[in-house]
Amino acid sequence: DVKVTQSSRYLVKRTGEKVFLECVQDMDHENMFWYRQDPGLGLRLIYFSYDVKMKEKGDIPEGYSVSREKKERFSLILESASTNQTSMYLCASSQGPTPYGYTFGSGTRLTVV
Amino acid sequence: QQQVKQSPQSLIVQKGGIPIINCAYENTAFDYFPWYQQFPGKGPALLIAIRPDVSEKKEGRFTISFNKSAKQFSLHIMDSQPGDSATYFCAASYSNQFYFGTGTSLTVIP
């Protein structure tokens, strides 16, 4: 069964900490994405990557950065965590063109205190 | 700016009812319209999808109706069951990017 694995289900971090969220996919997918999910706002794209060492900003990149050193791994970095970054973070991957759609990980619920 | 508008935000139906979730879009470049189902504590999972060259697609109890001229599409769940209680997201895609609706929380009462 194909998988997108997010390293942590729940995280609690303090304001100002640097936070790393890790995502690994085993499907040899080219494309990887990071979303945050908030009630009433749906899924909002933070960053995405179509290739190793490539990254593109999504709709809400402020306060975040990403790293893709290997094809299977896509990391989201919160440079200095703030309380407004408390959210559910979802990683997804996809094969090149649609119609294959996304495969999502189970999410990481991050709480910043 | 929300590329895909989804309604209602929440929906409660009795078992056996037919909940309908609606989505609308503006960008005519979209060429793929999936629906995702998300259970609590899980990531969204692809449920059913349609291309704009067909007006309807059925998979089991789930049906997508697509109206290209109106730029609207909807999800119908036939004979709904308590196990269908979840959050449903519509999406629209082109050029390998997906734009999601804000989600509909469906509760099916036994």
Image (cartoon, rainbow, N blue to C red):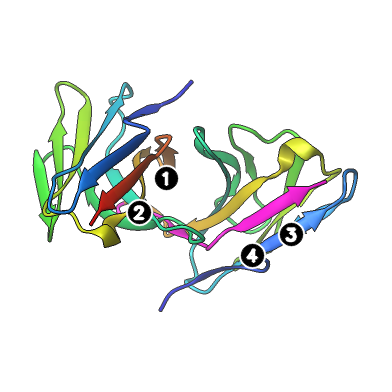
Quadrant housing residue B94: top left
Q: Quadrant of residue B5?
A: top left
Q: Please check whether the numbered discs 2 and 3 fall on a single chain.
A: no
The spot of residue A79 in percent (x, y) is 84, 45
Residue beneath the point at 70% across and 52% down: A110
Residue A54 vs B69, above or below: the answer is: below
Residue farthest toward the bottom in the current orientation of the protein? A1
Percent coordinates x, y for residue A35 in the rendering = 57, 46
Q: Which residue is mark 1?
A: B96
**Which region is colored magenta?**
A99-113
Distance CA(mark 1)–CA(mark 2): 20 Å
User: Which of the 4 quarters of the picture holds residue A70?
Assistant: bottom right
Q: Residue at x 83, y 53 (%)?
A: A13
Asked if the residue at tag 2 contacts the one at tag 4, i.e. Cβ–Cβ closer than 8 Å, the answer is: no
Q: Is residue A56 above or below residue A3?
A: above
Tag 4 residue = A9
Q: Which residue is mark 3?
A: A11
Q: Amino acid at mark 3?
A: Leu
Q: Secondary structure at mark 3?
A: strand
Q: Give the residue number, with chain letter if any, for mark 2.
A: B37
- Disc 1 secondary structure class: loop
